[in-house]
Image (tube, grey):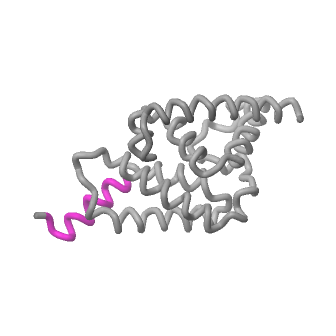
Amino acid sequence: MTTPEARRVEFERLLEQHGGIIRKVAFGYARTENDRRDLMQEIALQLWRAYPRYSPERPFSTWMYRIALNVAISFLRSNMRLVRQTVPLEQVDHEMADESSVSPETKERLAILQQVIAELGPLDRALLLLYLDDNSYREIASILGITETNVATKLSRLKERVRKDMTQKIAGE
């Protein structure tokens, strides 16, 4: 049996190791810096509260994504006024490539992609976020609580929708 202190230390280590998940989810669901900070704190709090039920037989990142996405979707639903706001491209991801290496055309396409993603519903946004983060269909299914077949079907439709919306926005429609 582990001590409360050992449990806290292990949780902090896992949180540090997988902290990028929290940041990605917060950037995907909150539009202002203050809201992102609030959402990241709420995700961390809910992870800590749920940690006693975490089973080491499952990957921590899968468990963490599931909780983070559920918290973010609840946050989004309780703050629907945020849905139509946009985030400037330079705030999307601090881990993006150096700005000087990104062409103006690429910056424009990324801005359009961010706009298209912001217009998606919470579950589609979660699905796309997990897909873009290179999770397998099995991992996505486990995180979202749906079948792998459902993941494949939804992703196929979602990719087509994103392609269509991107094409329309690039053409200025």
Quarter of the figure that contains the C terminus: top right
The single residue placed furthest to the left in the displayed view is: 1
Tell me which segment is drawn in magenta: 2-16
Which residue is at 35% across, 68% downward?
A: 49
Residue at x-position 42% and y-position 56%? 67
Residue that extends furthest to the right in the rendered view of this protein: 173
The one nearer the camera, 55 or 61, is: 55
Residue 14 location, x and y as percent?
A: 32, 53
Pick the front one: 121 or 40: 121
Q: Nearer the viewer, residue 102 or 148?
A: 148
Residue at 79% across, 29% down:
167
Q: Residue at x 32, y 60 (%)?
A: 12
Examine the residues drawn in magenta and state their main secondary structure.
Answer: helix
Q: Does residue 171 appear to the left or right of 129 in the view shown? A: right
Q: Is residue 102 left or right of residue 149?
A: right
Q: Position of residue 83 (x, y in %)?
A: 70, 57
Closest to the observer, 97 or 118:
118
